[in-house]
Image: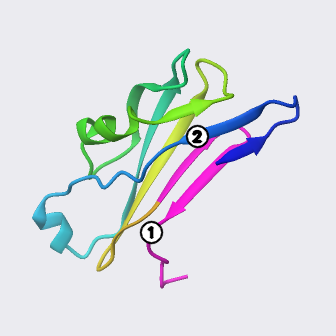
Amino acid sequence: MGQATTDGSDRTTLSSFCHIPLPDHLKQANITFTDVYAFKLSKIGIPVDIKKFRAKYTKIEDVENCVQKWQFNGFAEGSIFHVEFSWKHGLGWIKMRISSKNFSQITVLRKDSAR
């Protein structure tokens, strides 16, 4: 998906939803959460230096395996991004949000019925 910028350049992202595995006891628990990770972009627009920002239930290795396949074009090297993974009890993964300064992209898998 592209996003026009004020300097005339075009920003594009190539990402896929990360179906991060969870242990059965978490899937069966009455729990709703959002885990957040941060990363920087390499010179060629690939996420590097992936770190837990606010994450309790997911494993960084699983997030790295998915996020490292993404591609960001039109963003400066070293740009800092956050990715949020939202899990809702009884529904599973419902949303993923990728954000940075002046950029936000949300992928919704299931509408949150509690809105």
Q: For numbered disc 1, what is the local secondary structure?
A: loop
Image-quadrant location for residue 61: top left
In the picture as drawn, the residue positioned furthest to the bottom comes out as: 113
Specify the quadrant that holds the C terminus: bottom right
Left or right, 67 with respect to 80, comes to left
Q: Nearer the viewer, mark 1 or mark 2?
A: 2
What colour scheme does the image use? rainbow
Q: Which mark is residue 25?
A: none
Amino acid residing under circle 2: Thr
Q: Which mark is residue 109?
A: 1
In the image, residue 88 lies in the stretch drawn in magenta: no
Q: Mark 2: few, some, or many residues within 10 Å (few <14, many ≥20)? A: some
The span picked out in magenta is: 96-115
Query: Which one is nearer the viewer's eye here, 16 or 100?
Result: 16
Residue ID at (64%, 39%): 12
Left or right, 86 with respect to 103, comes to left
Q: For numbered disc 2, what is the local secondary structure?
A: strand
Amino acid residing under circle 1: Leu
Q: Which mark is residue 13?
A: 2
Left or right, 68 with respect to 103, comes to left
Instruction: Name which of mark 1 and mark 2 comes first in the sequence.
Output: 2
Q: Mark 1: few, some, or many residues within 10 Å (few <14, many ≥20)? A: few
Q: CA distance from mark 1 to mark 2?
A: 18 Å
In the picture as drawn, the residue positioned furthest to the left comes out as: 24
In the image, residue 109 lies in the stretch drawn in magenta: yes
